[in-house]
Image: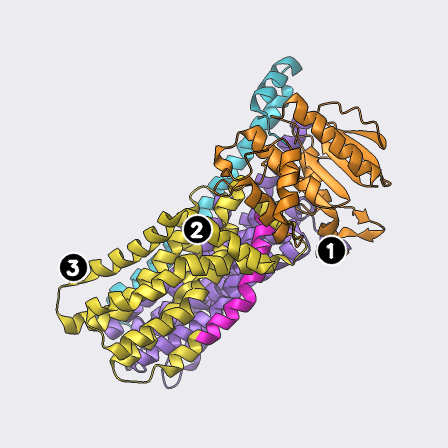
Chain colours: A yellow, B orange, C purple, D cyan
């Protein structure tokens, strides 16, 4: 059943390819703005790179979260999803997995490319890729709770950011920390382990919270 | 209850297989809320609902294998074609439907030739028929239909009537919120009037 | 289950009314006593001079901010689990006071940091975590404000508060980790070798005063919320009568 | 008295500043709640006042205020 939900969302996203591209372009543009704002000194750019790339990934995923449930909510298919004979958190997991593939994976793939703007070494780019690979599921998982809570509310987009960004802080700290560790030559292992641990915690709690949020919003 | 206001109280009835309940009442009298309570989209403030003797809350997800609920919005994705909508909706429900009898169902609902058209080109009435086609393919025993006859032409209403009659003959139960009189030839007809 | 049905908001309204003076007056008294001890009895600190006296408001505010968030999450959780409207109303009543205390602890912390560290904001681990706690409060209040139906607002708030409370320790740990990583151990605001007796008593008195004050103010706001919600209910009932 | 004057050896601004802010925060909270309570009180009084007017007038007022909520 899970693969059908993911398959359905992938078809839907494929039919509206522009949405995927818009999120990726937003990410690339935000990251490229910083050198323009701060100046081209490579030493400075290298030190801010981890934070810039991670914050840009956070904001880009915030953009696409609004649509996670909203389209299904408007055309009534979300109600039907609540009535499937499978536990609701499986449905949520399917939606989150689909959202991760559609909105987050492109960011992870393009991040090393964008990292080159900040004169990062190959090793650092690789750690950046791994940290985003580990971190972005957290963004989708915790984000799905925010999307579920703010379903159908006016000003939903901004509201999601206020609710969810504080909860992203550990992911940001460990993720950006891992990249920064490699820049200063320290092993990024502890950061990545902690990031992985936080990912597992979110994997456990977020679907339950998101399905509770959906039940409440659809009452 | 909606907000802090009680919609209805002291509702106590039991339905045997083959019953058709026509649910009527002015707007805001709680028809939709009753239907949503019956399919657990809404929790009742007090009281409980039993399906075959077991409280539906304790039945958990298995209860949904026996229920089909069609709400105000048809629940059809615009980007998907009518056929995809039907097959995927059922697959998500765990009922694998092959394309033949899916398009067969669409044809009986009068959508011949439009199966592969993305749903956004369909009219509201046609979209409603795609939703109703789900009734043909799913073998659930309890149908909860909320104002599904709106925007349907005469022929489509006739189609729905025959669908419900077959469903009742198979021992199913249908609770339909509508103001149109469906003189059913099969099963027992009950009327439930909700007043404000 | 009967217990929660009994504590219906309408029944609790007069009870809360009677309780408020019992908390408000002692709170005022304790504030006066605490300030007196803090300012007149406690000696001038050899290291920080008199700047440390800010501690008597900063530390209680920080503790209250954190304690009220957990209390809010518990009330919201109970309200959601047992469908007890009064408990959810209590959570909404606590939110604003908790946010106020968190904001107060941030401002007083900055006022304290300026003389001791020379900057208003030094990204000290505890201050940063308090800042994020303020964001969590803001999220709760914003979410409840954005939802019109009180029942959904209560339950959505409960989900957010519970998710928040699970995350608070993780956030505190990650900020701690982040802080030691970058700055090494800065001198902690409270890291004085020994706290003179009067300082400690002043601190505890002020904490008790803040707690009593919180109970009083939360009960007042609770009564307002009960009035607002029952008002709508009675008006709707009147319309349907 | 262990601090000679209000300036407290130069720290006065910070100490009094923070307590002033605390006072402002508490006073704001108390006043805003009192204001909110007063607003609720006369709203209730207005609703009660509605009841005393002749029934015919009242029902028109109420019908105006009921919005058709689609169930």
Whether labels 2 and 3 share one chain = yes
The residue at the point 48 percent across, 75 percent down is A197
Left or right: residue C87 versus residue C69 is right
Q: Nearer the viewer, mark 2 or mark 3?
A: 2
Q: In front here: B31 or D61?
A: B31
Letter of the chain that mark 3 sits on in the rendering = A
Question: Can residue C169 be seen here?
Answer: no
Alpha carbon of mark 2 to alpha carbon of mark 3: how far?
A: 33 Å
The secondary structure that dominates the magenta segment is helix
- Give the quadrant of the N terminus of chain C: bottom right
Letter of the chain that mark 1 sits on in the rendering = B
Q: Residues within 10 Å of mark 1 (few under 14, many from 20)?
A: some
**Residue beneath label 3, please?**
A36
Up-down relation of residue D64 to residue B99 (above or below): above
**Residue beneath label 2, please?**
A13
What secondary structure is found at the residue carrying circle 2?
helix
Residue C224 coordinates in the image, percent (x, y): 55, 44
Q: Which residues are magenta?
A: A196-218
Q: Which mark is residue B62?
A: 1
Q: In front here: C69 or C222?
A: C69
Whether labels 2 and 1 share one chain = no
Decide whether residue C212 is among the magenta residues: no
What secondary structure is found at the residue carrying circle 3?
helix
Residue A211 coordinates in the image, percent (x, y): 58, 56
The residue at the point 84 percent across, 31 percent down is B186
Left or right: residue D21 versus residue B98 is left
Alpha carbon of mark 1 to alpha carbon of mark 3: how far?
A: 58 Å
Write down the quadrant of residue D53 in the picture.
top right
């Amino acid at each position: 059943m899970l693969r059908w939900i993911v398959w359905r969302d992938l078809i839907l996203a494929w039919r509206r390819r522009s949405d995927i591209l818009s999120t990726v372009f937003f990410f690339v543009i935000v990251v490229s703005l910083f050198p323009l704002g701060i100046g081209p000194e490579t030493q400075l750019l290298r030190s801010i790179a981890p934070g810039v790339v991670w914050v840009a990934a956070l904001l880009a995923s915030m953009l696409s979260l609004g649509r996670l449930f909203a389209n299904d909510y408007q055309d009534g298919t979300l109600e039907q999803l609540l009535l499937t004979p499978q536990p609701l958190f499986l449905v949520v997991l399917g939606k989150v997995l689909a959202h991760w593939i559609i909105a987050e994976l492109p960011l992870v793939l393009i991040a090393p490319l964008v990292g080159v703007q900040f004169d990062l070494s190959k090793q650092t780019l690789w750690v950046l890729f791994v940290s985003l690979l580990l971190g972005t599921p957290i963004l989708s998982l915790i984000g799905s709770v925010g999307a579920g809570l703010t379903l159908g509310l006016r000003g939903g987009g901004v509201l999601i950011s206020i609710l969810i960004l504080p909860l992203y802080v550990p992911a940001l700290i460990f993720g950006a920390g891992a990249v920064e560790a490699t820049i200063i030559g320290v092993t990024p292992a502890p950061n990545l382990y902690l990031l992985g641990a936080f990912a597992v915690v979110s994997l456990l709690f977020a679907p339950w919270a998101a399905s509770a949020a959906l039940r409440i919003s659809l009452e | 209850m909606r907000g802090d206001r009680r919609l209805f109280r002291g509702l106590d009835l039991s339905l045997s297989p083959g019953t058709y309940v026509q649910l009527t009442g002015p707007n805001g009298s709680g028809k939709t809320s009753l239907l949503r309570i019956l399919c657990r989209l809404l929790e009742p403030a007090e009281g409980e609902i039993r399906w075959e003797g077991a409280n539906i809350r304790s039945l958990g997800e298995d209860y949904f294998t026996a229920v089909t609920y069609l709400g105000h919005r048809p629940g059809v994705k615009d980007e998907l074609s009518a056929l995809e909508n039907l097959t995927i909706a059922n697959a998500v429900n765990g009922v694998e439907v092959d394309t033949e009898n899916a398009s067969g169902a669409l044809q009986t609902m009068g959508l011949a030739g439009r199966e592969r058209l993305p749903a956004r080109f369909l009219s509201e009435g046609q979209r409603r028929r795609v939703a109703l086609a789900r009734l043909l393919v799913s073998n659930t025993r309890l149908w909860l239909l909320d104002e599904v006859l709106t925007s349907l032409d005469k022929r489509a209403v006739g189609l729905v009537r025959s669908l419900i009659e077959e469903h009742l003959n198979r021992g199913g139960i249908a609770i339909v919120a509508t103001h149109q009189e469906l003189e059913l030839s099969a099963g027992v007809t009950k009327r439930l009037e909700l007043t404000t | 289950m009967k217990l929660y049905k009994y504590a219906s908001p309408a029944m609790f309204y007069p009870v809360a009314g009677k309780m408020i003076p019992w908390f408000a007056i002692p709170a005022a008294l304790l504030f006066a006593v605490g300030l007196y001890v803090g300012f007149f009895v406690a000696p001038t600190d050899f290291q920080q001079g008199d700047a440390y006296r800010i501690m008597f408001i900063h530390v209680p505010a920080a503790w209250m901010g954190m304690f009220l968030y957990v209390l809010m999450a518990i009330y919201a959780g109970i309200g959601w689990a047992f469908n007890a409207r009064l408990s959810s109303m209590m959570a909404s009543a606590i939110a604003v006071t908790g946010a106020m205390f968190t904001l107060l602890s941030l401002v007083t912390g900055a006022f304290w940091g300026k003389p001791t560290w020379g900057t208003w904001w030094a990204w000290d681990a505890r201050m940063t975590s308090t800042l994020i706690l303020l964001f969590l409060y803001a999220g709760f209040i914003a979410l409840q404000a954005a939802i019109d139906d009180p029942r959904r607002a209560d339950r959505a708030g409960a989900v957010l508060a519970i998710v928040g409370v699970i995350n608070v320790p993780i956030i505190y740990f990650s900020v701690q980790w982040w802080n030691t990583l970058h700055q090494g151990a800065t001198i902690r605001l409270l890291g004085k070798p020994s706290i003179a007796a009067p300082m400690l008593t002043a601190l505890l008195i002020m904490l008790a005063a803040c707690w009593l004050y919180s109970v009083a103010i939360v009960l007042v706001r609770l009564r307002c919320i009960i009035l607002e919600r029952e008002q709508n209910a009675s008006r709707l009932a009147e319309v349907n009568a | 008295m262990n601090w000679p004057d209000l300036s407290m050896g130069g720290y006065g601004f910070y100490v009094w500043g923070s307590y002033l802010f605390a006072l402002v925060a508490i006073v704001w909270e108390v006043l805003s709640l009192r204001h909110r309570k007063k607003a609720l009180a006369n709203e209730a009084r207005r609703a009660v006042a509605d009841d005393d007017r002749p029934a015919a007038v009242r029902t028109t007022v109420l019908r105006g205020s009921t919005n058709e909520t689609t169930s």
